[in-house]
Image (spheres, rainbow, N blue to C red):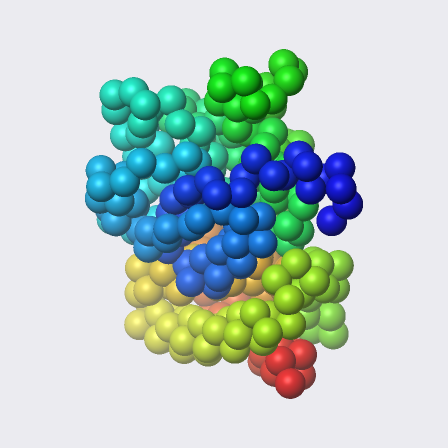
Amino acid sequence: MDSSNASGLAWLRGKRVLLAEDNITNQMVATQLLDALGSRVDVANDGAEALEMIEAHRYDIYLIDIEMPRVSGLDVIKSIRQSAPPLCDAPVIAVTAYALREHREKIAEAGADGLIPKPLISIEQFGRDILNLTERVRRAAGGAPAAAHAQSAAPDVPAAATAAPTARPATGRPVEMEVFTGLAEAIGPEAMRDLLGKIDSDLDAAVQQVREGVAASDMSVLSNATHVMISVCGAIGAEPLKTLAQRLNAVANGKASDDPAAIGSDISMQSTVLRAFLRSKAQ
């Protein structure tokens, strides 16, 4: 990290951050990055826990995942904005894998300052994104020069560009190496080994749930299992398996009519390839 970046990111040192995220893999990644930036992080495992922690403590920054059980991230954001000062004035940033225009509009309507898209793979980029989206508060406090406030830390992605393909993804390249190596460099080798072990365990459990959901034609089980898989794969750039999980998730939620058994079979095969890769990198 060069001196110019370090001086800009120094504002984050000592800041108390609430991270609301239900996926342990994403918790590990975000916490490692925030620790490296010098922030103090508390983690809420779902939306309901986040609301309890917000009532008990005052935070400088809120990082809120949108898809969470019990209480959604959008409802958490709305609750913050409907509260009395100073809580309602604190910067609130959505951290989400869903960054299409329709999602951005809902996030903006809820009252967030903007969003940071997953996966999170760079300490410096993560820090700059947070600085960009907290500029309103920092400028009011005299901590940042006046500039146009960014509503999002990433360009909008058209729906056609992110639509899940119907063809089976190739199994020879389980991850995008730029994402994978960027994450490894950001969090360090020891944390990366821990992360890969956790991802391997999560994938094993999720694939078993997919098999059970397909066998029982249980769309709720399939929806939950693929939600975990999408989040886990996104963290390390495992796009082939993530794409398959997105397709099956769409089926489970009534947004597509593909054969769940066929996609489930592809998921099992691609998961085997990915897990073998992860185990080789964790040694």
The x and y percentages for residue 239 are 64, 60
Rendering quarter of residue 36: bottom right
Query: Would you say 8 lies left or right of 232 here?
Result: right
Query: Would you say 211 lies left or right of 115 here?
Result: left
Q: Give 156 or 34, whichever is nearer the viewer.
A: 34
Q: Which residue: 39% across, 44% down? A: 18
Q: Which residue: 66% across, 51% down? A: 122
Rendering quarter of residue 22: bottom left
Q: Is residue 61 visible?
A: yes
In the rendered view of the protein, which quadrant contains the C terminus?
bottom right
Rendering quarter of residue 251: bottom left
The x and y percentages for residue 199 are 51, 71
Q: Give 123 or 22, whichever is nearer the viewer.
A: 123
The x and y percentages for residue 248 are 48, 59
The relative height of residue 139 versus residue 161 in the rendered view (above or below) is above
Query: Would you say 68 lies left or right of 28 here?
Result: left
